[in-house]
Image (cartoon, coloured by chain):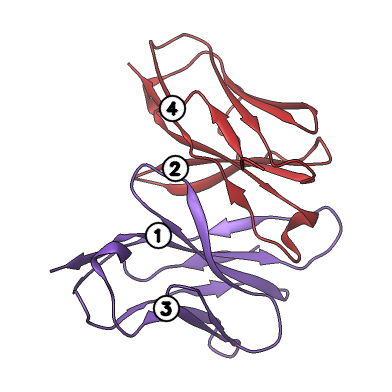
Chain colours: A red, B purple
Amino acid sequence: DAGVIQSPRHEVTEMGQEVTLRCKPISGHDYLFWYRQTMMRGLELLIYFNNNVPIDDSGMPEDRFSAKMPNASFSTLKIQPSEPRDSAVYFCASSLRGGYTAEAFFGQGTRLTVV
Amino acid sequence: AQSVTQLDSQVPVFEEAPVELRCNYSSSVSVYLFWYVQYPNQGLQLLLKYLSGSTLVESINGFEAEFNKSQTSFHLRKPSVHISDTAEYFCAVSDLSGGSNYKLTFGKGTLLTVNP
């Protein structure tokens, strides 16, 4: 397996624009996580899914953020409208059986810059 | 709720010196513990994990960590570091509360810089 695949690797957008980040988890994994990493706040869990169902979205900063997982092999994180404070590296990770016996595998991340 | 505290944000050391990166956690239930490493411009990779059994766990590149339940700690150690160990290290905890309720909580990270 190629691991967790995220696209794009880098995204530069103007304030107010819609941004969509994409993630393909490892085949067979039943948990998917979206994290955001910044210098100030470190690594924050935004939302996670179990079997394509959102379980906990308490980390989503505000209504401008939304995440979907239409099937077991694809997830999106959308920001609309984007703001400069959304600039960060966004990581997607997947795990089998929720990490009870396995770790989370991370993608390479998407570096988002909102100008 | 669970939390992870990494006491040092930066640790500079010289090559071949020993190093300890500290991690303390809090949780109301039993936990699994992990150390991840992040090299520049890359995602996080698992370094080692404690699930059960022996409280001392080792990685393939010479790191080890010891689970201390009474002190709620999971410190990471290496007796002799290399330049290539320069990276950011994250301690993480996941609880065993069961069901689909699962959360992997990370500390803020410790930047290990190995100087020649």
Mark carried by residue B62: 3
Depth check: B42 or B28 in front? B42
- Give me the C-alpha separation between circle 4 and circle 3: 37 Å
Label 3 marks which chain's residue?
A: B
The local secondary structure at tag 2 comes to strand
- Locate residue B17 relative to residue B62 in the image: left or right: left
Eye-nearest disc, 2 or 3: 3
Q: Do the residues at pointers 3 and 1 share their chain? A: yes
Disc 2 packing (10 Å; few <14; some 14–19; many ≥20): some
The local secondary structure at tag 4 comes to helix
- Locate residue B68 relative to residue A25 in the image: left or right: left
Label 1 marks which chain's residue?
A: B
Looking at the rendered structure, the kind of residue marked 2 is Gln
The spot of residue A90 in percent (x, y) is 50, 35
Disc 1 packing (10 Å; few <14; some 14–19; many ≥20): many
Looking at the rendered structure, the kind of residue marked 3 is Gly
Measuring 61% from the left and 50% from the top, which residue is drawn there? A105
Q: Which residue is mark 1?
A: B109
- Give me the C-alpha separation between circle 1 and circle 4: 20 Å
Residue B9 visible in the displayed image: no
Mark carried by residue B48: none
Among numbered discs 3 and 1, the one appearing first in the sequence: 3
Measuring 54% from the left and 73% from the top, which residue is drawn there? B25
